[in-house]
Image: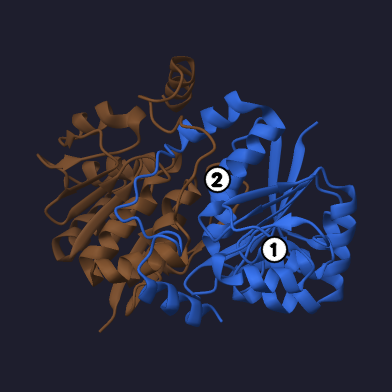
Chain colours: A brown, B blue
């Protein structure tokens, strides 16, 4: 039987939050990734420059084994959307893994699934995560029971490789890493607030608030 | 005036090849990223699990400043498609930057734009790149004049950060890197054929051929 993996998308999504993990998880043997939305249809990303299709509505996929909630400013309305939160609670009750990337953790928090759990999010939102009942941890990937959360945007790739190893073993995860040639060599070392120039940290923090 | 960035998509695309660079380049000040296809409309990725929308047809955007061709098995038909190759040659003549990710370089090669140029592609396709007239270089990002090519799939993120620094300076590229929290920490060190177990290299090489 295949592992059903549901990635929840919405207008205002940050595309890489969803597509990084998709690229890893869709290469798992016996896995089936489905993009779902409150309603099916094309969702525009946070920049407006890209349309990504939700093939199913939430109601059509109530019990995936893996749930993934990506970030992006468009997910804030979901934090007060009873239909979405009810679906998330039900899906989390039945899931093998419940996961998020970036501010997707805020939606998991709003659904109550992070109460007292160690979790992470984009570095600029760790305080917001605490207000939702989680114990924020400034690490790239945080695992607490069946909940796996990733830090900002690109961290979803690392989270998904971790998840791939949990689902199918280290060899399969390594084969996927080799297939997507994930041997990162950023031209700069400015990817975290501890490493970037302080002025850029202030700039990003103010643009994210 | 904004920098017009065109990402060419097609059925059978590897999504992360396109979305990694999109996530970086769409954050450039004054840049406008557009997903284009031979025809406009939704393209399904190589796994079949995702639909991504081309907003414009090639003919509607003849002279972008930046051209990006991603990889995926679905791009092989483009290598013999006169309409696509004509568009690519014209776009390359006028471009500021012509770029590819993964096997997107094969399409640039088929268009004749890599003749005698240093270029890279997914590690399993370096020989194929030579047959198309390029000088293959097994590096993650290769720059030759206005041509920037990236190695497999995830290398597009590194390429795009390099391109962002060329277009808008190092500070802007670093701010983007911090915004997408690109401080990679893969759980394994198996992302290149030099590092992965030999059996996995054989496995991926045979699945890619």
Element on which disc 2 rests = helix
Q: Earlier in the sequence, mark 1 or mark 2?
A: 1
Spatial separation of the CA atoms under disc 1 and disc 2: 16 Å
Q: Is residue B190 shown left or right of residue B126?
A: left
Q: Is residue A135 shown left or right of residue A65?
A: left
Identify which residue is drawn at 79% across, 70% down: B110
Q: Is residue A189 shown left or right of residue A92?
A: right
**Residue pointed to by mark 2:** B158
The chain carrying label 1 is B
Q: What is the quadrant of the N terminus of chain B in the image?
A: top right
**Few, some or many C-alpha atoms within 10 Å of disc 1 (few <14, some 14-19, many ≥20)?**
many
Q: Nearer the viewer, residue B168 or A15?
A: B168
Identify which residue is drawn at 79% across, 45% down: B146
- Do the residues at pointers 1 and 2 share their chain? yes
* Whether residue A204 is situated above or below residue B195 in the rendered picture: above
Residue B198 spot, x, y in % from top left: 38, 72
* Whether residue B50 is situated above or below residue B68 in the rendered picture: below
Q: What is the quadrant of the C terminus of chain B in the image?
A: bottom right
Res B30 visible: no
Residue B41 spot, x, y in % from top left: 68, 67
**Residue pointed to by mark 1:** B105
The answer to whether marks 1 and 2 mark residues whose Cβ atoms lie closer than 8 Å is no
Element on which disc 1 rests = helix
């Amino acid at each position: 039987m295949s592992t059903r993996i549901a990635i929840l998308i919405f207008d205002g999504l940050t595309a890489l939050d969803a597509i990084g993990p998709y690229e890893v998880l869709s290469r798992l043997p016996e896995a089936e990734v489905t993009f779902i939305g409150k309603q099916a249809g094309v969702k525009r990303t946070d920049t407006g420059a890209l349309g990504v299709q939700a093939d199913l509505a939430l109601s059509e996929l109530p019990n995936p084994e893996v749930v993934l909630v990506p970030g992006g400013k468009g997910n804030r309305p979901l934090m007060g959307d009873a239909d979405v939160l009810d679906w998330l609670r039900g899906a989390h009750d039945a899931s093998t893994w419940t996961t998020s990337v970036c501010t997707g953790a805020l939606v998991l928090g709003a659904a109550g699934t992070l109460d007292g759990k160690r979790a992470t999010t984009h570095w600029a939102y760790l305080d917001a995560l605490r207000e939702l009942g989680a114990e924020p941890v400034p690490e790239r990937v945080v695992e607490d029971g069946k909940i796996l959360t990733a830090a900002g945007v690109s961290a979803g790739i690392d989270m998904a490789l971790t998840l791939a190893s949990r689902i199918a073993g280290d060899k399969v995860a390594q084969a996927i890493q080799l297939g997507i040639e994930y041997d990162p060599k950023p031209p700069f070392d400015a990817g975290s607030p501890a490493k970037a120039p302080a002025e850029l940290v202030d700039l990003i923090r103010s643009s994210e608030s």
